[in-house]
Image (cartoon, rainbow, N blue to C red):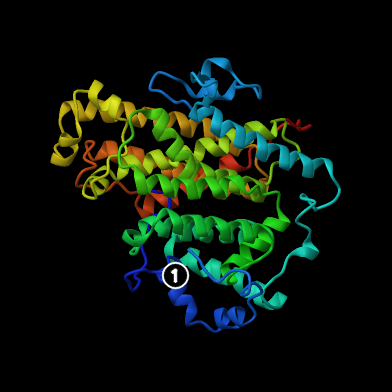
Amino acid sequence: MSSVAVLWVAASSPNPDPMNTCGLVRALESSRVLSRCQNQRVNNGRRNQTTQTTWSSSSSVMSFRRRRSSVVSSSLVAHPAGEIDLSSEEKVYNVVLRQAALVNKQLRSTSPVLDDVKKPQDIVRPGSLSLLAEAYDRCGEVCAEYAKTFYLGTLLMTPERRKAIWAIYVWCRRTDELVDGPNASHITPMALDRWEARLEDLFHGRAFDMLDAALADTVTRYPVDIQPFRDMIEGMRMDLRKSRYNNFDELYLYCYYVAGTVGLMSVPVMGINPKSKATTESVYNAALALGIANQLTNILRDVGEDARRGRVYLPQDELVQAGLSDEDIFAGKVTDKWRNFMRLQLKRARMFFDEAEKGVTELDAASRWPVWASLLLYRRILDEIEANDYNNFTKRAYVGKVKKIAALPLAYAKSVVKVPSSRGTT
């Protein structure tokens, strides 16, 4: 299960190209704009293949907030050969530090160029600026069609930020389609390797199609690091090889790969309030927490749906501690043991939402309202699970339109809270 799980209808083939058989791209192939872009494809000769933390049940969110940039020896595991394994927390934290450093580099520089290798004049775009505008528009259309609530939230952003978020969203959607879409059974690790190579090209300005072009343009305008994008692809690889998670440390890493990465991708576009005193690192930690919270919510909402696909995205050791097993989940019966287990899982997810709230107030004023709205609405899914008496086997928890509308004024009120002046860096 990944953070974006709407499927498109696509034709299947014995050995499909995973992107060209994706319903999204097939629909685009019939559009005038894509045809014009493909006629001007800049890299045919080079490439013509294709293919969002250690948190145990006893640990708290605050332990991660207090984490320093230096390696904490207690979270490391040494092997006889002298190699050292980082915990999931440390692996993810290193990505947070890297992205925070990239943003701080921009803050200290008067130049918009963030990477000496990737300069605007090096970016090759498929066609004119008008075609690039159409590419962004197409990304917006995809968002409007397949993520209506998300799309409405983006309309509250400034036009430039809105377009960039659309481009990021569509890339995440396409990536997710590789393992969660109609052709998922044909996808191999090699196909994901090709998709990652295409990502590398994209970050160097070599766009394969119009949707790539929109993201290639976005990453030149904002201090977006490539690592979260790579990590999302790694989450897709994990979905190919794993259907069980022994403990929450393993599940946390998966949640980071498929959803926490989206927070790290988005913050550079959302922007941080220049008057905020919060460190860049702390804002990214909060964005990471929001992604984790959203994915945990997805998991808890979709237990029954995942079980019917033979998947259990719940910590196996915690199931055992609760006196439960996979067989109980496949049976789909709500018992007192299940209710007690779910209460603890909901409590953990809410802890991550609490952590995320601390960072939303530090975002740029123009971005806070849609993020607050998203946070409040997604958090209410947890309330709906409770309202369904923890029956997430046969009932899908969702927030109705009336409750969605009612959440908007509260989100707006939270978004206009002023933050202290004089912002620090990490």
Which image quadrant: the C terminus?
top right
Which residue is labeled 1 in the image?
Answer: 24
Give percent across and percent down for residue 190: 45, 56
Q: Residue furthest front?
A: 81
Q: Is residue 92 above or below residue 201?
A: above
Which residue does the image show at 80% across and 65% down from the upper left? 121
Give percent across and percent down for residue 148: 44, 61
Which residue does the image show at 54% across and 23% down from the upper left? 84
Q: Nearer the viewer, residue 118 or 192?
A: 192
Q: Is residue 419 above or below residue 232?
A: above
Q: Nearer the viewer, residue 340 or 118?
A: 118
Q: Amino acid at mark 1?
A: Leu
- Label 1: few (<14), some (14–19) or many (≥20) C-alpha neighbours in 10 Å: some
Asked whether residue 52 is in view, the answer is no
Q: Nearer the viewer, residue 357 or 132?
A: 132
Give percent across and percent down for residue 279: 70, 31
Which residue does the image show at 51% across and 35% down from the upper left? 289
Dot 1 lies on which element? helix
Q: Is residue 100 above or below residue 309?
A: above
Give percent across and percent down for residue 227: 60, 45
Question: In the image, 217: left or right of 48?
Answer: right
> Residue 283 is drawn in which quadrant?
top right
